[in-house]
Amino acid sequence: MSIYTILYDVNYMADFTEDFKGLKCPMPVLKTKKIIKKMTSGQTFEFVADDAGAKVDIPPLLKKTGCTLVEMKEDNGVFTFLIKKD
């Protein structure tokens, strides 16, 4: 599956999805790390969080765990992350 497929296929569904809204640092990072451990190469994980710290804390975690940040977007203080395990 290519990055193009992930970003532009309206029927695309991530392998793992979670809603971390309402959780404060460090919980979104800790829960993301736990899910990454369950993932296999090529799988994707999409989650939402409303803790602004996630925007800063998630990219370094992904670098350490061999994942790619495919997309991050913000809408009214809610961040949506799509990551892929390399």
Image (tube, grey):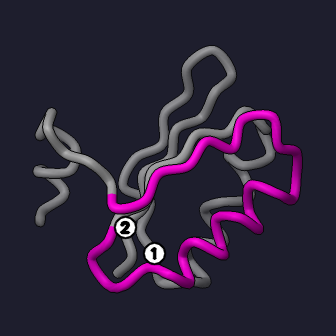
Q: What's the residue type where badge 1 is placed?
A: Cys
Q: Is residue 16 left or right of residue 79?
A: left
66 relative position to 8: left or right: right
Q: Position of residue 86 (x, y in %)?
A: 34, 81
Q: Who's the residue at 64% across and 27% down the image?
A: 78
- In the rendered structure, the answer to whether residue 19 lies left or right of residue 73 reads right
Q: Which residue is mark 1?
A: 67
Q: Secondary structure at mark 1?
A: strand
Q: Which residues are magenta?
A: 15-43
Residue position marked by numbered label 2 in the rendering: 84
Mark 1 and mark 2 residues within 8 Å of each other at the beta carbon? yes
Magenta highlight on residue 32: yes
- Seen in the picture, residue 37 relative to 56 is either above or below; the reply is below
- Placement of the N terminus among the 4 image quadrants: bottom left
Q: Residue at x 55, y 19 (%)?
A: 75
Which of the pair 54/45 is nearer the observer?
A: 45
Identified at 45% across, 50% down, the residue is 46
Q: Position of residue 68 (x, y in %)?
A: 41, 68
Q: Secondary structure at mark 2?
A: strand
